[in-house]
Image (cartoon, grey):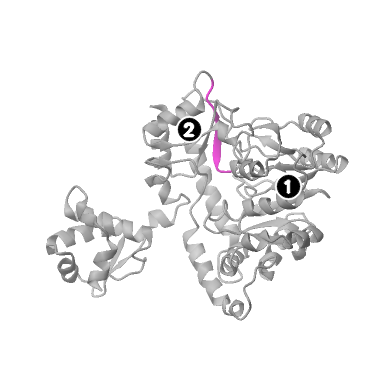
Amino acid sequence: MQRGFAAELGNWRTKEGPLARSLAAAVREAVVDGRIPAGTRLPSERELARALELSRGTVVTALTRLRDDGWLHTRHGSGSVVRLPTRLTERTTPWSLDRGGTGDADLDLTLAVTAAPHEAYLAALGRAVERSPALLVDSGVATAGLPRLRELLAERYTRSGLATRPEQILVTSGAQAALTLLVDRLHTDRRSPVVVESPTYPGALAILRRRRARLLPVPVTAAHGWDTERLAETVRANGPQLAYLIPDFHNPTGAHMTAPTRAAVAALADRHALTVVVDETMRDLDLRTPPGTEPHLSGARVIQIGSASKVLWSGLRVGWIRASADLVREVLRNPLQAQLSPPPLEQLIAAELLGDGDGGGDGLDAVLADRRARLRRQRDHLAGLLAGTGWTYTVPDGGLSLWLHLGEPTTATELAARAAGRGLAVSPGPLFAADRASLAHHLRLPFTATPDVLTRAVDLLTA
């Protein structure tokens, strides 16, 4: 057992510095990587010293460091147990953002993502495992989704003012999977252009580019939102059959579509036989106090897609399509659907998290309230740090990022390159542009990191 524990620490002796510090760091890395599971009981100090061929004093120093940092819990007479510190489990920020993740970056702010709600997720996982035996007697073949999850999603839409039946829901392995299936079904004429916002979500652009779709960008800004006249002119002049829009805390601008604009877009879609795919991934990330009550962008030619990835955790690969029951049945016949369907256990976990707490959990409302409060503080902290830079931005009412305008003469690509040289990875505006070249003076800066990391990031960005 001791040799096994020692082996999981890797080649930690080659690190520079005192052995006790290197040993403590090796244990932390092994816990985060999953090589040593949280809850593992450590060998005694004497046994550990013998297995690692160290003095007992060195081991005691390393364990004291881990204990002080919250990585060990020691009870007299029962030994020490590995755990994750509360400063990691009680925050919305992925720990990897603090440690880099893009190339050689020390800080990675290219992804606007959150960490899982730790305690709620583990509790949901436990309840999902308890419910799983009934699944194991069935085939496990992909369907439109587990009945309980489809019912929960339909109920959520209905409660928010959009009457929905379970048969109108198709569960997918994320919002990109949902968009992939819909584009495959709806964009049958490769010559037909597709309306997108400018800027917009790069993942959606990638899906549309793979189909060699001609993209028709329509501007959206954080300050002024959507130009419905420009949208109408684009539709009348080009006759597109498909549009992709993000009306709720738009990625990356944070703009939020007003109720009259939603009605105007739905009417435009009806008049011109335009199918609008509405990405609602950010809808629950409303940071207003209290949250607003804008209706869904809906109508006869409007399809909604959503995901648990931004609200709960990117590792929970569960998304959905809300459409007519007929379209759901058509998409089910696509051979890709089985490959883009999440495993049953993932769906069970999502059902527990999206439920109302009847299974013993806190329910989504409690999780959202906590996430919104933390994100609100981080957003305001980042806005305060940027106040003296001369860059302009609109503080968004929701979402996960600020959309900065840098002004002349600096381009975002140049600034991102300089930041990369200092160890900070960020996303310049052209990544969000349909033509890959415009939006040259814009930069997306997520506020999903902790305040201290945001402070370090702005220092590196403005140095």
Marks 2 and 1: which is nearer the front? 1
Depicted 70 relative to depicted 151: above or below: above
Q: Is residue 385 left or right of residue 397?
A: left
Q: Amino acid at mark 2?
A: Gly
Q: Residues within 10 Å of mark 1 (few under 14, many from 20)?
A: many
Give the residue displayed 15% in from the left and 70% down from the top: 46
Give the residue displayed 13% in from the left and 61% down from the top: 57
| Mark 2 vs mark 1, CA separation in Å | 35 Å
Depicted 282 relative to depicted 404: above or below: below
Q: Is residue 270 left or right of residue 303?
A: right
x then y, percent, for residue 62: 21, 58
Q: Amino acid at mark 1?
A: Val
Q: Secondary structure at mark 2?
A: helix
The answer to which image quadrant residue 45 occupies is: bottom left
Depicted 191 relative to depicted 330: above or below: above
The answer to which image quadrant residue 42 occupies is: bottom left
Residue 238 in view: yes
Residue 277, disc: 1
Residue 402, disc: none
- Among numbered discs 2 and 1, the one appearing first in the sequence: 1
Depicted 301 relative to depicted 363: above or below: above
User: Quarter of the image containing the C terminus?
Assistant: top left
Q: Nearer the viewer, residue 260 or 10?
A: 10
Residue 384, disc: 2
Residue 70 in view: no
x then y, percent, for residue 156: 70, 59
x then y, percent, for residue 96: 41, 49
The magenta segment: 399-407
User: Quarter of the image containing the N terminus?
Assistant: bottom left
